[in-house]
Amino acid sequence: MEVQQMEAQAVTRDGRAWQPSYLLDISQEICIGCGRCFKVCGRSVMSLMGVTEDGDLVGLDDDDEILRKVMTVSDPGACIGCAACSRVCPKNCQKHGPSQGIENDARKPLSAIA
Ligand code: SF4
Ligand code: SF4
């Protein structure tokens, strides 16, 4: 899939320029699934998912197979780049920056995105 390159030119309410810091990735090796980032995000960008013994991401309904939970970037295109989620993360496991396209890795096995 071709990656879209989009550099947003954003402004504050009174017209001052500012650079959005979009949520690009969450390290699924480091994330502890605490949910703090999810609570502060008003854009429904992230979803909590389960990780199986094989390192696959599954929905939370698959209770029997889940070893731990991690936050995933399930709707990257909805992010406005406010960076609130990074400020509350206790593990510093998020990657933020200018838009690098909107590919979604949330449902790939961990081995494919590590
Ligand atoms: S940067 Fe803001 S909008 Fe984007 S995921 Fe984090 S809290 Fe949500
Ligand atoms: S705040 Fe950090 S450690 Fe907690 S779920 Fe979000 S990304 Fe993971």
Image (spheres, helix red, strand yellow):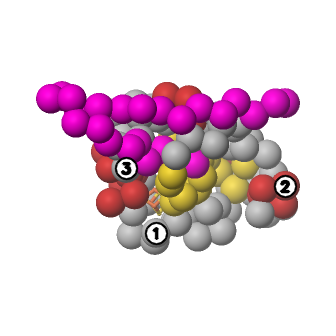
Residue at the image point whose x is 52% and y is 46% from the top: 98
Q: Position of residue 1 (x, y in %)?
A: 84, 30
| CA–CA distance in space, label 2 to label 1 | 21 Å
Q: Is residue 51 magenta?
A: no
Mark pair 1, 3: CA separation: 12 Å
Can you give x and y, in whole percent of width and height, for residue 94 in the image?
51, 59
Kind of residue indicated by mark 1: Asn
Label disc, if present, on residue 6 of the rendered structure: none
- Nearer-N-terminus badge (2/1): 1
Q: Is residue 65 visible?
A: no
Question: What residue would you read off at disc 2?
Answer: 112
Q: Could you tell me residue 84's position as x and y percent?
A: 32, 50
- Please state which of residues 73 and 65 is positioned toward the viewer in this rendering: 73
Which sits earlier in the primary sequence, circle 2 or circle 3?
Answer: 3
Horizontal relation, residue 62 to residue 17: left or right: right
Give the residue pinned by disc 1. Answer: 92
Mark 3 is on which residue type?
A: Ala
Front position among marks 1 and 3: 3
